[in-house]
Image (cartoon, rainbow, N blue to C red):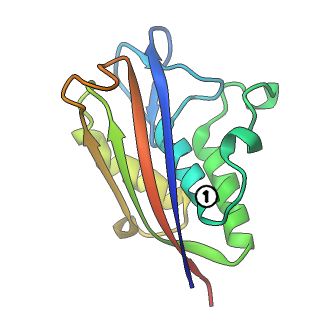
């Protein structure tokens, strides 16, 4: 048995915040605005996992009105989600992600992000793919960063 889930997240870029993507701090003069660390990649992955099993999204699970999640580490939130996925007998078969950002260039951060996600999801790095793209000055126009994630879960034996 398999299940497929899709997740999407986007946050606005602002000054005075660290830029965290896929659990990696990326040197940049702006960061993503959000209640947690605003890691759009980790959020998209968590929503893909939850969506695959028709569970409520991370906004319901970790509400932005709850002070317990203020500046929360999104990789820790992802680990929490994945623990529930595992407890129901499912595991990640593979994960494919796309980060949408005009700037900064993300090429050199892809491998470290894959390593962090593989560890958080208790799987090998070969099961995790991350791509980065721009929208050619359209869409977010450099004002934010978005991420899509598609996950395939398989029932554990």
Q: Is residue 120 above or below residue 4?
A: above
Residue drawn 31% across the image and 26% down it: 139
* Residue that lies at the very extreme toward the top in this rendered image: 15
Residue drawn 72% across the image and 28% down it: 64
Helix, strand or loop at label 1? It is helix
Q: How many marks?
A: 1
* Image quarter hosting the N terminus: bottom right
Few, some or many residues within 10 Å of mark 1 (<14, 14–19, 20+)? many
The one of 24 and 46 positioned closer to us in this rendering: 46
Q: Is residue 104 above or below residue 120?
A: above
Image x and y of residue 84, in percent: 73, 63
The one of 55 and 103 positioned closer to us in this rendering: 55
Would residue 110 be found to the left or right of residue 7 on screen? left
* Image quarter hosting the C terminus: bottom right
Would residue 18 be found to the left or right of residue 157 on screen? left
Residue drawn 24% across the image and 33% down it: 134
Q: Is residue 141 above or below residue 64?
A: above
* Residue that lies at the very extreme toward the bottom in this rendered image: 157
Image x and y of residue 104, in percent: 27, 25
Image x and y of residue 21, in percent: 44, 36
The quadrant where residue 126 appears: bottom left
Question: Which residue, given by chain and number where applicable, does mark 1 sit on?
Answer: 51
Residue drawn 46% across the image and 42% down it: 41
Image x and y of residue 155, in percent: 61, 82
* Residue that lies at the very extreme toward the front in this rendered image: 139
* Residue that lies at the very extreme toward the left in this rendered image: 136
Would residue 130 be found to the left or right of residue 58 on screen? left
Would residue 100 be found to the left or right of residue 133 on screen? right
């Amino acid at each position: 048995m398999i299940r497929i889930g899709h997740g999407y997240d986007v946050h606005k870029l602002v000054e005075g915040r660290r830029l965290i993507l896929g659990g990696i701090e990326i040197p940049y003069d702006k960061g993503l605005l959000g209640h947690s660390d605003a890691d759009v990649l980790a959020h998209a992955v968590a929503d893909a996992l939850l969506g695959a099993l028709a569970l409520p999204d991370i906004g319901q699970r970790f509400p932005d009105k709850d002070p317990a999640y203020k500046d929360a580490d999104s990789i820790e939130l992802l680990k929490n989600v994945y623990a529930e996925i595992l407890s129901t007998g499912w595991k990640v078969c593979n994960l494919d992600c796309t980060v949408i950002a005009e700037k900064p260039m993300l090429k050199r951060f892809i491998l470290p992000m894959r390593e962090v996600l593989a560890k958080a999801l208790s799987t090998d790095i070969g099961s995790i793919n991350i791509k980065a793209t721009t929208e050619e000055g359209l869409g977010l126009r450099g004002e934010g960063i978005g991420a899509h994630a598609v996950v395939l879960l398989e029932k554990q034996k």
